Image (cartoon, rainbow, N blue to C red):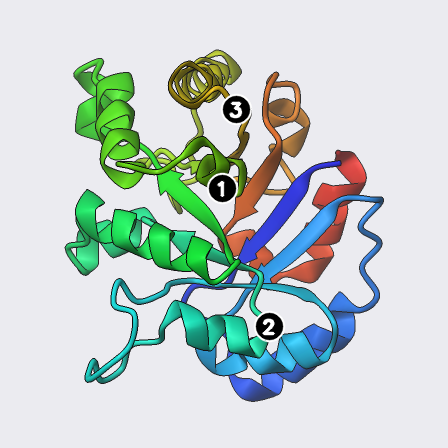
Amino acid sequence: MKYIMLNHKMNLEYKTIKKYIKQLATIDTKGHSLIVFPSDIYLTNFIDSKFMVGSQNASSNKDGAYTGEVSASQLRSLGVQYSLVGHSERRKYFKETNQDINKKIRLLLINKIIPVLCVGESLNDKNSAATKEVIFRQLQGALDKLSSKDIENLIIAYEPVWAIGSGQIPTNEEIEGVIFYIKDLIYKNFKVKVHVLYGGSVNENNIDIIKQTKGIDGYLLGGVSLHLDKVQELIYKL
């Protein structure tokens, strides 16, 4: 069984969402765990339709006067089961720090929502042979003072920043090296095993190659997640 996570980002309008939900109901998951991450305004549409649902973000504050934010407890009250944390677009455009991400993870865990922690290097990091160093810092900051029990309820998604939306992907050897680096690092420090996904320009055309990589527990899909015919083709190839 693999996790197949569909991150819509800031896409799809209401009429399209209704059609999307109808088509999603026809998807043959082949036993894989399919989770949708729509825009917040559509969360209830997917929850009411009995799909597994995640949020694309959660506030680093428990509650209060934070206009435009959505708290982990509010998400949980809707029935949200997962939440992305630390996506590179949040880090880049909203200046989220590892400390912010750590706060979000703690609040999500308190509210019984599974955090999906995104980590990954930039192209400059890759070219400087600093990939593992960058990921170490991201994990160290995001997981600060968490317990082994906390980590058991966490999923990590490795998404090279330079691969997201670019059509470029690392080699299988590069992906495998990072996946096992993360798993080994987590086990060394927390003595637990963690699921690690891969994301970054995964689609129905390159999944035959990527799936040969050892250690991948699932995929975080971006652009292709908007096209369920392509998602179905990808699933059939797993």
Tell which tag, 3 or 1, sits nearer the viewer. 3
Q: Quadrant of the N terminus?
A: top right
Residue for point 42% across, 23% down:
190
Relative to residue 195, is residue 107 depicted above or below? below
Residue 216 left/right relative to 208: left
State which tag comes first along the sequence, 2 or 1: 2
Residue type, mark 2 in image: Gly
Residue type, mark 1 in image: Leu
Q: Which residue is mark 2?
A: 79
State whether residue 39 appears in this view: no
Label disc, if present, on residue 192 of the rendered structure: 3
Q: CA distance from mark 2 to mark 1?
A: 18 Å
Residue reaching furthest to the bottom: 15
Residue type, mark 3 in image: Val
Q: Based on the displayed image, in which of its 4 quarters is residue 79 positioned?
A: bottom right
Nearest the camera: 138 or 120? 138
